[in-house]
């Protein structure tokens, strides 16, 4: 619970410092990219705090690299 609360507080500070000026300056690409990454990080923190098992992407990355470079 403390982890989630800390990330939400840091997220609010990020919104105030970075996202509001981006919105006011109409920097739409940066704004939507930052908002989507913030939402993803908040979702992941809540899931981790609730002890939900999140699969590691390393297996998928290893399969892609082996496929591209033909490693066995």
Image (spheres, helix red, strand yellow):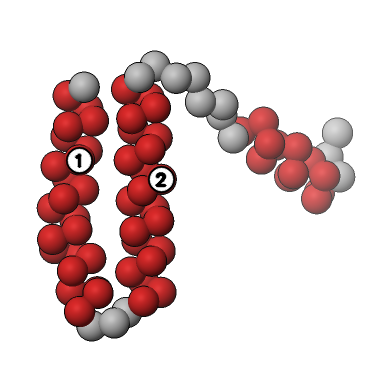
**Residue 70, x across and y down, in percent:** 86, 45
- Give the numbered dot on residue 49: none
Q: Which quadrant of the structure image shows residue 59?
A: top right
Q: Which residue is mark 1?
A: 8
Q: Secondary structure at mark 1?
A: helix
Seen at 17% across and 24% down, the residue is 2
The Cα–Cα distance between marks 1 and 2, rounded to whole angstroms, is: 12 Å
Seen at 23% across and 65% down, the residue is 19
**Residue 52, x across and y down, in percent:** 44, 19
Seen at 18% across and 74% down, the residue is 21
Q: Which residue is mark 2?
A: 40
Taking the image as shown, residue 59 lies to the left or right of residue 71, namely left
Taking the image as shown, residue 49 lies to the left or right of residue 1, namely right
Image quadrant containing the N terminus: top left
Asked if 2 appears above or below 40 in the picture, the reply is above
Q: Earlier in the sequence, mark 1 or mark 2?
A: 1
Q: Nearer the viewer, residue 50 or 72?
A: 50
Binning the other alpha carbons within 10 Å of mark 2 as few (below 14), some (14 to 19) or many (20 upward) gives few
Asked if 60 appears above or below 35 in the picture, the reply is above
Q: Residue furthest bottom?
A: 25
Q: Secondary structure at mark 2?
A: helix
Seen at 51% across and 26% down, the residue is 54
């Amino acid at each position: 619970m403390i982890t989630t609360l800390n990330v939400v507080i840091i997220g609010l500070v990020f919104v105030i410092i970075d996202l509001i000026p981006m919105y006011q300056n109409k920097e739409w690409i940066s704004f939507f990219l930052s908002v989507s990454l913030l939402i993803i990080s908040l979702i992941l923190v809540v899931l981790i705090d609730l002890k939900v098992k999140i699969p590691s992407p390393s297996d998928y990355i290893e399969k892609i690299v082996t496929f591209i470079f033909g490693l066995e």
